[in-house]
Structures are given as structure tokens and as C-alpha cells.
Amino acid sequence: MSTTFSFIGKQIIIYCGTPSFLSGVCGGLLNTLVLLSLQTFRDSSCAFYLTIMSIFNIGQLFTGLFLRIMIALYDIDGTETSLFYCKFRLYLFHVCTAISLTCLCLATFDQYCSTCYRSHWQQFCNIELAQCLAIISNIIWSLHGIPFLVYFNHIQSPSTNTIFTQYRAFVIFLGLIGYLPITIATLFGLMAYYNVQ
């Protein structure tokens, strides 16, 4: 029974994951190319956030989905042979996901500020501030991911840090890369829509 589920899981990863991966990478590359090539977008803080988001989305696809596809196709799982590789892959996936979602939130906030009728809020829409915020978020999320390198074990054992496991499950997955960015993006997107109306 478990071998049947394993086979079905591999087939889903191969036949659904491969087109998703290819279209995601192509879309991310095209987004990056368009946003970097046109002068109109190069001067826009929102386009800057979207460019960074597209780059980290590609990183997220490579560190997450691509490796799953390779495991399903060739049955070679580097995470089982190297604990460092397992930890570092998860670290990169976490950092790429967090930075991508942060840039999404910053882009929606930027759109809210640019559509706001108060000139004070419109001052937040500048490329210098966008670059500073992108650097700060990269540093914060890179440092925040360090516990993945230290505490993560792919095999649950008595030596596994239970505090980190609970923090990962409830704070990171549910809060920081779960409900919080969705709530922020939705809230500022609706407020920007209201401003345009």
C-alpha cells in the first residue's frame, strides 16, 4: 500500500511539478527581463520590489521543486547522504520564500503609498528607500534562517530541538510565511484599490 502511494506521489511530482517548475522559471526570467530592460520600470520602487521577488521566486523553485523532481526522476536524494546539504537546502528555501513574500508585501505597500492622496505617504515611493529596505530584508531573513543550519534534523530524534520545531511549525510556517504576508498584501491591495476609486 505504501509503495503504491509512493509511486503515485512520484508521478504527481514528475508530471505536475515539471511543467510548474518550467513555467515558473520562464515566468520569473521574463518578469526580471522586462522589469530590468525598460527605463520606466527601472525608476519605479514597486518594479524594483517585483524584480527582487521574481529573482527569489526562481531561487525558491530551484531549492524546493527542482530538487523534488530530481529525487522523483533519479531516486538520488542528497539530503539523505549529507546533513549539511539538507540543512543548507532548507535554509536557502526558507530565505528565498521569506524575501519573496516580503517583497510582495513591500510592493503592495508601495502601491498604496503611490495612490494615497496625502503627499507624506507618497514620499515612501522612491527607489533609494526600496533598495535600503530590500537590503535590510535580505540581511534579516538570512540571519533569521541560521537556526535551520544549526537545529534542523531531517530525522526526528530525542536530540531534536523541540523549541525550534514548534517555532518552525507555528511561527514561521503559519505566521511569517503563512497568514501574515497574505494579510498584509490583501490589506494594502484593498486600500490601494480604494484609493484609486
Image (cartoon, grey):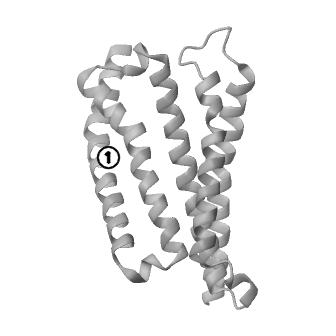
Residue type at mark 1? Phe
Residue 25 to residue 168: above or below: below
Secondary element type, mark 1: helix
> Taking 35 as reference, is 126 left or right?
right
Q: Is residue 189 visible?
A: no
Seen at 70% across and 27% down, the residue is 164
Residue 93 to residue 46: above or below: above
> 112 or 134: which is nearer to us?
134
Quarter of the view holding residue 61: top left
Q: Please rate how many residues cluster around mark 1, counting C-alpha atoms within 10 Å: few if below 14, some from 14 to 19, many from 20.
A: some
Image quadrant where one finds the C terminus? bottom right
Seen at 60% across and 14% down, the residue is 156
Q: Is residue 56 visible?
A: yes
Q: Which residue is labeled 1 in the image? A: 21
Residue 25 at what x, y percent from top left? 32, 52
> 73 or 9: which is nearer to us?
73
Residue 59 to residue 188: above or below: above
Quarter of the view holding residue 112: bottom right
Image quadrant where one finds the N terminus? top left
Residue 161 to residue 186: above or below: above
Seen at 38% across and 39% down, the residue is 65
> Taking 67 as reference, is 106 left or right?
right
> Taking 64 as reference, is 137 left or right?
right
Quarter of the view holding residue 31: bottom left
Count all numbered tags in the image, as a single digit: 1
Residue 79 at what x, y percent from top left? 42, 21
Residue 161 at what x, y percent from top left? 70, 19
Residue 146 at what x, y percent from top left? 63, 33
Seen at 24% across and 27% down, the residue is 73
Q: Residue furthest top?
A: 158
